[in-house]
Amino acid sequence: MDEKKDKGLQGNEKIEEAILALQQEPTEELLAHALTVVRRRMREQGQFIVAVEPPSADVKEAVMQAAAMRLQAVQTSDGKKWWSAFTGFEEELKGSGSVMSTFLTDIEQLFRMTLNADGIEGVILNPWNRTLMLDKQLIRIILGE
């Protein structure tokens, strides 16, 4: 398929490849490699696709003005809440079956928002397929903090 990718998503297939390698052989080395690839994409001003909760009608106007879209959180079996992000539209379409409101966000900006969010464990990258769960500790490693 020769579709033109959004510029911010070009190169994210490297993240998917690193995650695939990690899924096939979960080692510290391959985790470190996957984190390095994510960091490299972040430094290249890479973007992820994030799903947002549609604002309720009464606050829609205020929300739009503040541009404070609420990221959609997923809950894992242990009851913890995570934000989900996607490396590309193919990954986003693989799972939910429901149409989501999405937008592109800067990887670094998403990670910084995650670190400041109460009640959010981290970011699940590609929750349906090439999945990488980035808790706040791993996000700090990616950010080099």
Image (spheres, rainbow, N blue to C red):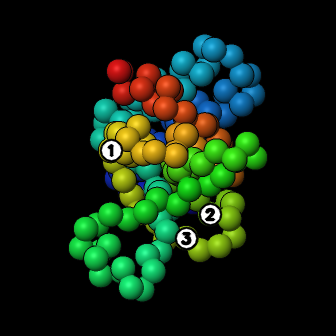
Rendered position, 102 above or below 126: below
On the rendered image, what quadrant is the C terminus found in?
top left
Give percent across and percent down for residue 135.
54, 33
Residue that appears at 67% across and 60% down: 94
Q: Which quadrant of the figure has residue 11?
A: top left
Which structural element holds mark 2?
A: helix
Rendered position, 136 above or below 127: above
**Is residue 101 toward the left or the right of residue 131 in the image?**
left
**Dot 2 corresponds to which residue?**
93
Name the outermost residue toward the left: 65
As drawn, the label of residue 100 is 3
As drawn, the label of residue 109 is 1
Rendered position, 3 above or below 46: below
For label 1, count other residues whose C-alpha is less than 10 Å away and answer few (under 14), some (14-19) or many (20+): few
Which amino acid, mark 1? Gln
On the rendered image, what quadrant is the N terminus found in?
bottom right
Residue that appears at 36% across and 21% down: 144
For label 3, count other residues whose C-alpha is less than 10 Å away and answer few (under 14), some (14-19) or many (20+): some
Which structural element holds mark 1?
A: helix
Residue 20 seen anywhere in this rendered image of the structure: yes
Give percent across and percent down for residue 117.
42, 45
Are the residues tagged 3 and 2 within 8 Å (C-beta)? no
Residue 107 seen anywhere in this rendered image of the structure: no
User: Disc 3 to disc 2, how far (Cα)?
Assistant: 9 Å
Rendered position, 145 above or below 12: above
**Is residue 57 toward the left or the right of residue 34 in the image?**
left
Between disc 3 and disc 2, whose residue precedes?
Answer: 2
